[in-house]
């Protein structure tokens, strides 16, 4: 697996962890991050490659800095 795919995989895992820590459904999280539930699902499965804008919306929803989306 190349570095890009590994990074997406780690990011998708982290997004799911943050969402579950808040006990949010995908629907709740997507609403808070102003995105479609299907898009969030794709992010969590690692099949979407989010833009910085999307990452910023997720970070705002979780009340964390963008860097926290990449922390393990």
Image (cartoon, rainbow, N blue to C red):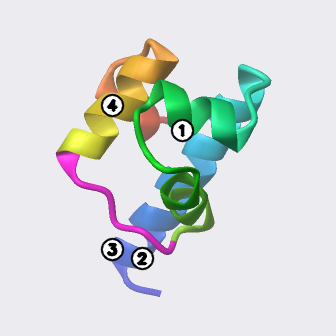
Displayed quadrant of residue 4: bottom left
Q: Mark 2–mark 3 contact, CB under 8 Å?
A: yes
Frontmost of labels 4 and 3 is 4
C-alpha distance separating marks 4 and 3:
21 Å
Residue at the (66%, 44%) spot, across then down: 16
Where's residue 9, x and y in %? 53, 65
Q: Earlier in the sequence, mark 2 or mark 1?
A: 2
Measuring from the top left, give residue 10's x and y in whole percent: 52, 56
Which quadrant does the C terminus fall into? top right
Query: 62 above or below 54?
Result: above
The nearer-to-camera label among 2 and 4 is 4
Q: Is residue 72 left or right of residue 1?
A: right
Q: Secondary structure at mark 3?
A: helix
Say if residue 72 shows up in the picture. Answer: no
Between circles 1 and 4, the one closer to the viewer is 1
Q: Which residues are magenta?
A: 47-52
Residue 36 visible to an observer of this rendering: yes
Q: Provide the residue designation for mark 2.
A: 5
For label 2, the SS is: helix
- Tell me if label 1 and label 4 are in contact, CB under 8 Å: no
Q: Which residue is mark 4?
A: 57
Q: Which residue is mark 1?
A: 30
Most extreme residue toward the bottom is 1
Crowd band around label 3 with a 10 angstrom C-alpha radius: few (<14), some (14–19), many (20+): few
């Amino acid at each position: 697996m190349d570095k890009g795919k590994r990074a997406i995989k780690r990011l998708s895992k982290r997004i799911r962890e943050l969402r579950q820590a808040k006990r949010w459904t995908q629907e709740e999280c997507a609403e808070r991050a102003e995105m479609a539930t299907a898009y969030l699902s794709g992010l969590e499965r690692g099949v979407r490659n989010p833009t910085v804008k999307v990452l910023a919306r997720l970070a705002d929803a979780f009340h964390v800095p963008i860097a926290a989306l990449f922390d393990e």
